[in-house]
Amino acid sequence: MNEDRPLTRLDMLRFARRVVEHQAARQLALMDRWIADEERREAERRRRLASRQAAPEWLIERGLNGSSAVYVHLGGCTSAGGRSKGVGRDQAVRALTEGGVPACPLCRPDTALGLLE
């Protein structure tokens, strides 16, 4: 531009347009980064869900000695301790009927297995 002549209204409008265009480009780039980050997080969440093993339907909780069974639980029982082992339906039924292992009083696996009504 020529510094001898004053800026016209048209010059100021063109300058303002360039500023807005530059700011919009920066904001769009920022939004694109946010979208890409969220897509990565969502893909990772889906990978974790897909790789997670299915929870067992039934659990047998062992005592501190590791050999005696304490309770039979439903698979999602929150009171099942860290010494619980996933078992199949038949093994859970045998533990309750033949093994004399009590049912958890919170999740009531005996009812879910149809042993009680």
Image (spheres, helix red, strand yellow):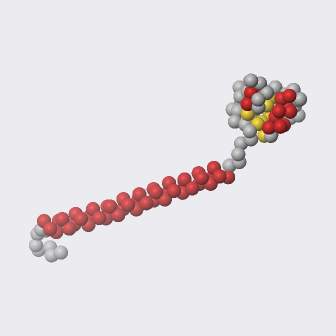
> Which residue occupies 54% across, 53% down?
42
- Whether residue 62 is situated above or below residue 32 in the rendered picture: above
> Which residue occupies 22% across, 66% down?
15
**Percent position (x, y) of residue 96?**
83, 29
Q: Residue furthest left?
A: 5
**Relative depth, front residue between 11 and 98:** 98
**Percent position (x, y) of residue 114?**
76, 29
Q: Is residue 11 visible?
A: yes
**Relative depth, front residue between 12 and 89:** 89
In this rendering, would 23 be left or right of 99?
left
Please identify the quarter of the rendering in which residue 72 is found. top right
- Looking at the rendered image, the quarter that the C terminus falls into is top right
- Whether residue 12 is situated above or below residue 95 in the rendered picture: below
> Which residue occupies 35% across, 64% down?
25
In this rendering, would 92 be left or right of 37?
right
Q: Is residue 64 visible?
A: no
Please identify the quarter of the rendering in which residue 56 is found. top right
Please identify the quarter of the rendering in which residue 86 is found. top right
In this rendering, would 61 be left or right of 12?
right
- Whether residue 31 is situated above or below residue 11 in the rendered picture: above
Q: How many labels sit on residues? A: 0
**Percent position (x, y) of residue 39?**
51, 56
> Which residue occupies 65% across, 52% down?
50
- Looking at the rendered image, the quarter that the N terminus falls into is bottom left
**Relative depth, front residue between 32 and 3:** 32
